[in-house]
Image (cartoon, helix red, strand yellow):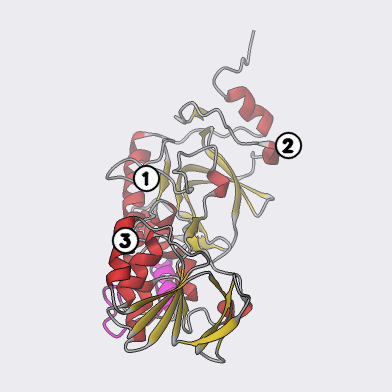
């Protein structure tokens, strides 16, 4: 058993989920990839072509955010565009062609204290991995409205860069008040006739420079002290219902698209206490690499990228993670596994195993 180079973190996670779990018969893989989407499937493709026989668990959202997207027109190689779900099926098929083992299931707990790393899938199934690639992505924050969810991909979007071009010469609504909201509203003015920024306060949280740019754009109109109560439309967005928080008055705004720009949440909760993260929960990686603070654990895609959040950049970091993992494994031979959590505890540095 080899101790992982995991730094000196005081907030070590609770390992009670592993108590009494017998790992003697656990499946032991060279690489386990946690999460699918462009990053995960690309990592699986590259690792499979390197004869590392990767195992990928798709997670709760098989295919990632793109499965909720209709047309994708900004991914190279698809001159006529492609449906998001269809593109993810092609990614998956290509990875499988070279031997990637793609399974349904969600990694629910990890133990990165030593190698081989221990993982629990769906809370009950133990697995061992000599290296781990994280590609759990990030989820856009939505308002939680029923029709917002129903019309997602049919006029409702959380990515202006991805979908703005579909709304040429239309009036659009956007909710949010931070820098991201200002950036997205400015981007939408390239295509829309008018962009209505809806904010629940009477002032923006965005930086002064971003506020100035947005307020100087004649296509952008601000609706203050207001929340979105509902999204209207049968098959596509036709408008939004607004409520003024000061007066209680409700009104309808006719728009052809509704953009939500209230932030993203990285799906990195199970790695807290193990991996270094920023204040928002994005995994920190070494410059120009996918290495995390724990040797043998690599992070890719939107789980570590809060800037670009594009399918093509996610795929790029998935490639990087597989190459980083391949080179690291070549220099670090596999370790034997303990049978139970008690054996693992005895194997940790600082624990005496003899007299």
Crowding at dot 3, Cα within 10 Å, few <14 / some 14-19 / many 20+, comes out as some
Side (left or right) of 248 relative to 252: right
Q: In this view, does 191 lie above or below 340?
A: below
Residue drawn at x 55%, y 27% as measured from the top left: 10
Q: What stretch is highlighted in magenta?
A: 74-97
Residue 233 occupies quadrant: bottom right
Circle 2 or circle 3, nearest the eye: 3
Crowding at dot 1, Cα within 10 Å, few <14 / some 14-19 / many 20+, comes out as many
Residue 253: image x %, image y %? Answer: 50, 86
Side (left or right) of 342 relative to 243: right
Q: In this view, does 197 lie above or below 325?
A: below
Distance from Cα at disc 1 to Cα at disc 3: 39 Å
Q: Considering only order in the chain, which callout, 3 or 1, is on the residue closer to the N terminus?
A: 3
Dot 1 corresponds to which residue?
A: 325
Dot 3 corresponds to which residue?
A: 210
Q: Nearer the viewer, residue 329 or 314?
A: 314
Residue drawn at x 61%, y 74% as measured from the top left: 247
Marks 1/3 in contact by CB < 8 Å: the verdict is: no
Q: Nearer the viewer, residue 124 or 200?
A: 200
Dot 2 corresponds to which residue?
A: 20
């Amino acid at each position: 058993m080899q101790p992982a180079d995991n730094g000196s973190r005081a907030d070590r996670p609770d390992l009670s989920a592993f108590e009494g779990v017998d790992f003697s018969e656990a499946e032991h893989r060279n690489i386990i990839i946690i999460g699918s989407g462009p990053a995960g499937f690309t990592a699986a493709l590259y690792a499979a072509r390197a004869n590392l026989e990767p195992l990928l668990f798709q997670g709760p959202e098989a295919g990632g955010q793109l499965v909720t997207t209709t047309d994708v027109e900004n991914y190279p190689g698809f001159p006529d565009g492609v449906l998001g779900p269809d593109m993810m099926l092609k990614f998956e098929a290509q990875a499988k062609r070279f031997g990637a083992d793609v399974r349904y299931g969600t990694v629910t707990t990890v133990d990165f204290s030593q190698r081989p790393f221990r993982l629990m899938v769906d809370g009950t199934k133990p697995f061992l991995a000599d290296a781990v690639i994280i590609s759990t992505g990030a989820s856009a924050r939505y308002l939680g409205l029923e029709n917002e969810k129903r019309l997602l991909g049919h006029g409702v979007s959380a990515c202006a860069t991805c979908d703005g071009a579909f709304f040429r010469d239309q009036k659009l609504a956007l909710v949010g008040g931070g820098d991201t909201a200002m950036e997205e509203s400015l981007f939408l003015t390239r295509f829309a006739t008018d962009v209505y920024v809806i904010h629940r306060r009477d002032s923006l949280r965005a930086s002064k420079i971003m506020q100035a740019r947005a307020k100087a754009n004649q296509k952008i109109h601000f609706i203050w002290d207001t929340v979105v109560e509902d999204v209207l439309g049968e098959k596509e967005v036709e408008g939004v219902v607004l409520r003024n928080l000061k007066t209680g008055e409700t009104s309808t705004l006719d728009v052809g698209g509704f953009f939500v720009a209230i932030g993203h949440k990285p799906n990195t909760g199970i790695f807290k206490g193990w991996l270094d993260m920023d204040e928002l929960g994005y995994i920190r990686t070494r410059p120009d690499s996918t290495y995390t603070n724990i040797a043998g654990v690599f992070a890719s895609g939107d789980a570590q990228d809060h800037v670009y959040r594009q399918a093509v950049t996610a795929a790029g970091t998935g490639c990087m993670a597989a190459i980083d993992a391949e080179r690291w494994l070549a220099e670090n031979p596999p370790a034997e596994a303990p049978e139970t959590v008690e054996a693992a505890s005895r194997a940790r540095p600082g624990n005496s195993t003899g007299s």
